[in-house]
Image (cartoon, rainbow, N blue to C red):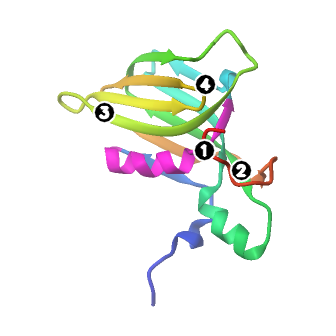
Amino acid sequence: MSDATFEEGAERPVFVAATDADDLHVISAMVQDAVLPITEMTWDRPRRRFALLLNRFRWEDRAAAEQRGRPYERVQSLLLIDDVTKVASQGIDRSDKDTILSILTISFAPGEDGTGRVELVLAGDGAIALDVECLNVTLRDVTRPYLAPSGHVPKHGL
């Protein structure tokens, strides 16, 4: 008997949660180079939920794709940040509905009594800052994987 490997989960949809900064590093790595139209981002103020529908590169499947000589894949995923009390952004023109955003990293800066700020750093000097009452982030695949349109591994921020 042996331990489970990362590759064994590569064919299943991702559903992960983050309640501390270490957990968030995992989600950040999984959404690195995810792209989304600016129209697929919303803040539901009454529910205190910020949601993004991402087209994320399947980093967890990269090694298997290379070993088997098959194309790289992307998948649509829902990134939810709950308990959001304030949203701010910079370097993003929300009025330009044709804008495509690319996530470089997600980080958490803790505040007092469990509060803090989740920051999404975007390619092209954009950023989104979310003040949160507590860290409560989930990532869930919502479609089947599809062939990555570029056919290549993303080059961070290009």
> Secondary structure beneath disc 1?
loop
**Residue at the farthest bottom position:** 1
Q: Quick one: label 1 or label 2, which is nearer the N terminus?
A: 2
- The alpha-carbon separation of the residues under discs 3 and 2 comes to 29 Å
Q: Which amino acid does label 4 sit on?
A: Met
Label 1: few (<14), some or many (≥20) within 10 Å? few
- Residue 106 at x, y percent in the picture: 46, 38
* Whether residue 11 is visible: no
Q: Which of marks 4 and 3 is in front?
A: 3
Q: Which mark is residue 156?
A: 1
- What stretch of residues is rendered in magenta? 19-36
Q: Give the residue at mark 3.
A: 109
Question: Which quadrant does the N terminus fall into?
Answer: bottom left
Helix, strand or loop at label 3? It is: strand
Q: Which of marks 4 and 2 is nearer the N terminus?
A: 4
Residue type beneath disc 2: Arg
Give the residue number, with chain letter if any, for mark 4.
Answer: 41
Query: In the image, which is nearer the foreground, mark 1 or mark 2?
Result: 1
Q: Which mark is residue 74?
A: 2
> Picture quarter containing residue 94?
top right
Q: Distance between the residues labelled 1 and 2?
A: 15 Å
- Tags 3 and 1 touching, CB below 8 Å: no
